[in-house]
Amino acid sequence: MKKLFLIAGLLGALSVNRVQAQQQPLPPLVNVSGVGEVRVQPTEVVVSLGVETREKTLEAARTETDKKAAAIISYLKKQGVEEKNIQTSYVTLQPIYNGAEYGRTNPDLYLAQKNMTIKIIKLDRFDELMAGLYKVGVNQVNGINFQAGDIDKLKMEARKRAVANAKQIATTLAKELDAKVGRPYQINEVESGGGPRPMYKTAMLESAAYDAGPSIAGGEVVVTSNVSVSFILEH
């Protein structure tokens, strides 16, 4: 019984302390948001491309697609693209029915697709590599994405700039109230959801038939960080 009373007393004391802690007033604070941006030239480009084949039989469609995919991989390796930078994204194989007759069991054609993602780390070779890829069987280009290689360092620099921006804003606000910014009370990084994003200065793709120069314009890669900071105000 004594143990029960002791436990109950301890629980009561903890509850009282918790309530008292919650009731303690916050120090005078200034709450601000800071944004940091880092803009760099892209150092690599990721290309999503593939092969699509239509044949009368399933085996012929599969065989032809696999043959072209193997040729693509072989070509890339010969051009110095590392194996780790070549990845098969998806494979599809399906029948195609051109007629509207209900209940047909024999398709008119079979469609086979094999898509892969490649990373090119030498942007000046983009046109050369793509020209060779078309020759060995690529007949689909689903998109390209410019990016920077050392993304972790860029994110860290963006965070530093965001914090500095937040402190600058807090200092300006405090000065208008004849106060000073003290130590930070709380800080949070706000998820922006976008991550690194490309900023294009010109059109991303242009036809080499109309322009003798490079057919891509990488623009800039922008890495952004957003922070929310509370500083203690000192008078």
Image (spheres, rainbow, N blue to C red):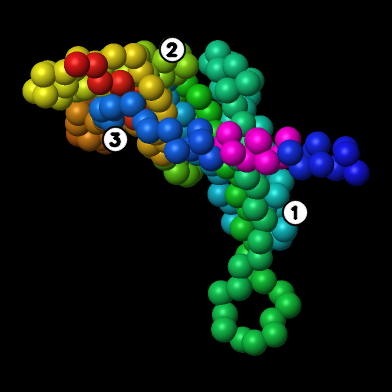
The amino acid type found where label 1 is placed reads Glu
- Position of 60 relative to 202 (above/below): below
Q: Residue at x 43, y 12 (%)?
A: 153
Instruction: Report, in whole angstroms, how far the alpha carbon at label 1 lies from the one at label 2.
Output: 49 Å
Please name the amino acid that badge 2 sits on: Lys
According to the image, label 3 marks what residue?
Answer: 205
Seen in the picture, residue 150 relative to 89 is either above or below; the reply is above
- Mark identifier at residue 59: 1
Foreground of the two, 89 or 111: 89
User: Reading the chain from its start, which is encountered first: label 3 or label 1?
Assistant: 1
Mark 1 and mark 2 in contact? Answer it, CB < 8 Å: no
Decide if residue 95 is on the left or right side of residue 193.
right
Q: CA distance from mark 3 to mark 1?
A: 36 Å
Residue at 54 percent across and 33 percent down: it is: 117
Q: What count of labels does the image hold?
A: 3
Element on which disc 2 rests:
helix
Q: Quadrant of residue 43?
A: top left
Q: Which residue in the protein does label 2 denote?
A: 153
